[in-house]
Amino acid sequence: MVELDELVNMSKAELDALFREGETPDPEGLEGVSEGRVLAGRGVLRAEPVRELVNNPLLPWKGKHVEGRHGSNRFEVGPLERKGFEFDMYVTRSLVDEDDEVLIFDYDTPENPPGIRRIRDDLKEVDDGLFLGTSNVRVGDGYRFLIYFALEAGDTEAEAEEEVEIDVS
């Protein structure tokens, strides 16, 4: 069994292998709020101290929020939480292995600024409720890998009860 925090310490080569072994996720498995971590990537994100820095609790990206086939990124600054950078979800061919399918987060929506609209995240489930994703940017007719990230699905029933309590008070 792989844990979310263990993925932070994996090399890009280890994450590549884990991603290829993963399963195409059921979109319903991501419903609700998920916790996220930034993992190995290109350039400076290859260095462990940089990965530790970007996963500091003080930095704002915390994960994703999914409702149906749509979602957004979650950002927190102190007690304030904000959603941003909307995406649509669907299953399509992987950028890594064209014979494989992945669930993608497609940021090419009218709500997003032009730079964000060029992003596509490919996602695989690597353990129950644990997802490994690649974030990629469209360059010309293709995509270029940026980083790996991980998401851990939350307990949607508990969150729904919590939201009801907040709405009632």
Image: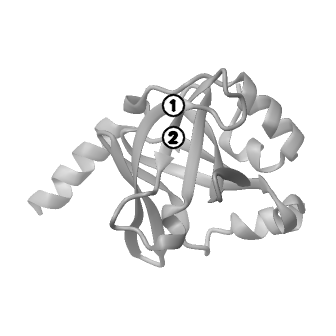
Mark yes or no: residue 107 visible: yes
Q: Can you tell which quarter of the image residue 151 is in?
A: top right
> Considering depth in this image, is 76 or 86 the residue closer to the camera?
86
Label 1: few (<14), some or many (≥20) within 10 Å? some
In the picture as drawn, the residue positioned furthest to the front comes out as 141
Instruction: Give the residue at x 57% y 48%.
Output: 121
Q: Residue at x 63, y 52 (%)?
A: 141
| Residue 39 x %, y % | 74, 53
Per the rendering, the mark at residue 92 is 1
Residue 123 pos. (x, y %): 58, 38
Q: Which circle, 2 or 1, is nearer the viewer?
A: 1
- Amino acid carrying mark 2 in the image: Ile
Describe residue 119's horizontal placement relative to residue 29 as left or right: right
Measured as percent of width and height from the top left, residue 48 is found at: 88, 60
**Which quadrant would the N terminus be assigned to in this image?**
top right
Which secondary structure, mark 1? strand
Residue 54 vs 143, above or below: the answer is below
Q: Total label count? A: 2
Element type where label 2 sits in the image:
strand
Query: Is residue 131 depicted above or below 75 in this figure?
Result: above
Residue 131: where, in percent of width, then height?
59, 37
Residue 24 lies in what quarter of the image?
Answer: top right
Residue type highlighted by circle 1:
Thr
Q: Do tag 2 and tag 1 residues touch (Cβ < 8 Å)?
A: yes
> Left or right: 101 with respect to 45?
left
Which residue is identified by label 2?
104
Q: Is residue 87 above or below residue 28?
A: below
112 or 45, which is in the foreground?
112
Decide: few, some or many residues near mark 2? Use Cα within 10 Å; few <14, some 14-19, many ≥20: many
Residue beneath the point at 23% across and 44% down: 161
